[in-house]
């Protein structure tokens, strides 16, 4: 049932499955977590798939002025082929894409098995979503279905490291009714090509100028629709000069900047940036007129913070881990 559209199913059973969490025996994949971990405002859960691999998802509770909201960070792949050096997922390599059912199952488990009303969804778990758009786009159709999860597209954000063809395809989707406020988060992570090539292998084939051209063509709405993500890594991309150069690059795009202090992972030489270096970078960026948001770090002890998430999959002869993350305010 998870991988089909509502108009091809009995509407009552479809609504029962998504709204009431019944008929789970008809699901094409598991919707019951095999492992659940909690740390403060963060819950990490795993779903075991038919081939023994596992997805990992994170629920983040964000307390606002009027009420709390829950953001669900979901995966689109097992592992990732892009190899960003600061990310555990990239160290896995790509094991396989997730199916539509396996993507939607993460929402179903969060909503029903873990009894959490999900307000926001971010495609920032395992994998590069734009490398699996044939499953991600149908998943969006189901997540926004008024008889199903009924999540507004304005509450969904998709992350990418800069797949140009995928950005262009997603831009076409956002020009359609119902998706005009779908958000895009782009992992920039460097102020120039020289630094970006050292930490993001994709940058060797896609220059920052080429990426900017694609981003400037992405449709916007009155609340933005795009955010530049920047993992702040000590002695790599964290100087005042880096901040000024980055903001000059972003200025024609006209998007916000989300600063993410690096969370240490196995096998990398960097430590977490100091509080003073984080504040200096942010203040310098803001002095240029750039809107800057600092990502709140959640779930460090669970290895559930940005860049740390880790399903332990045995691959290439060793155990390795997984992730990314984001929150809405």
Image (cartoon, helix red, strand yellow):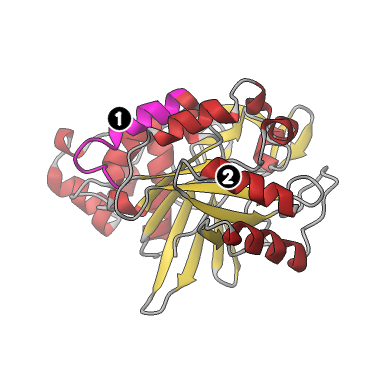
Q: Is residue 177 left or right of residue 127?
A: left
Q: Is residue 277 left or right of residue 138?
A: right
Q: Is residue 93 left or right of residue 226?
A: right
Quarter of the rendering occupied by the C terminus:
bottom left
- Secondary structure of residue under mark 2: helix
Which residue corresponds to the image point at 68% horizontal and 42% vertical from the top-left? 87
In-front residue for pair 308/248: 248
- Secondary structure of residue under mark 1: helix
Q: Quadrant of residue 140?
A: top left
| CB atoms of marks 1 and 2 within 8 Å | no
* Sequence-first disc among 1 and 2: 1
Residue 172 is tagged as: 1
Quarter of the rendering occupied by the N terminus:
top left
Residue 115 is tagged as: none
Which residue corresponds to the image point at 47% horizontal and 41% vertical from the top-left? 252
In-front residue for pair 44/131: 131
Q: Position of residue 33 (x, y in %)?
A: 50, 52
Q: Is residue 318 left or right of residue 289?
A: right
Q: Position of residue 193 (x, y in %)?
A: 67, 31
Q: Position of residue 306 (x, y in %)?
A: 62, 53
Residue 248 is tagged as: 2
Which residue corresponds to the image point at 37% horizontal and 51% vertical from the top-left? 224
- The magenta span reads 165-181
| 107 is higher (above) or lower (below) than 277 | above
State whether residue 323 appears in this view.
no
């Amino acid at each position: 049932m998870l991988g089909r559209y509502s108009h091809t199913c009995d509407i009552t059973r479809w609504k029962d499955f998504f709204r009431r969490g019944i008929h789970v025996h008809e699901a094409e994949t598991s919707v019951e977590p095999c492992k659940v971990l909690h740390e403060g405002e963060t819950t990490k859960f795993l779903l075991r798939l038919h081939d023994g691999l596992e997805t990992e998802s994170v629920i983040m509770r964000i307390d606002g002025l009027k009420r709390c909201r829950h953001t669900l960070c979901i995966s689109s792949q097992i592992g990732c082929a892009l190899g960003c050096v600061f990310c555990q997922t990239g160290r896995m390599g790509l094991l396989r894409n997730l199916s539509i059912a396996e993507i939607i199952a993460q929402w179903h488990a969060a909503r029903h098995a873990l009894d959490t009303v999900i307000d926001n969804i971010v495609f920032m778990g395992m994998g590069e979503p734009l490398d699996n758009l044939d499953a991600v786009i149908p998943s969006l159709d189901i997540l926004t279905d008024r008889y199903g999860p009924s999540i507004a597209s304005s509450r969904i954000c998709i992350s990418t490291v800069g797949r140009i063809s995928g950005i262009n395809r997603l831009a076409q989707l956002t020009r359609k009714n119902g998706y005009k406020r779908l958000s895009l988060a782009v992992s920039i992570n460097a102020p120039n090509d020289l630094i970006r090539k050292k930490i993001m292998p994709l940058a060797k084939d896609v220059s920052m100028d080429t990426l900017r051209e694609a981003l400037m063509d992405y449709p916007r709405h009155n609340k933005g629709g795009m955010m530049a993500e920047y993992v702040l890594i000590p002695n790599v991309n964290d100087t005042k000069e880096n901040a000024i150069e980055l903001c000059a690059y972003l200025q024609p795009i006209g998007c916000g900047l989300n600063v993410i202090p690096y969370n240490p992972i196995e096998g990398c030489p960097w430590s977490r940036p100091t509080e003073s270096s984080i504040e200096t970078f942010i203040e310098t960026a803001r002095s240029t007129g750039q809107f800057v948001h600092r990502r709140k770090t959640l779930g460090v002890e669970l290895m559930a913070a940005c860049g740390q998430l880790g399903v332990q999959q045995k691959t290439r002869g060793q155990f390795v881990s997984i992730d990314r993350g984001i929150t809405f305010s």
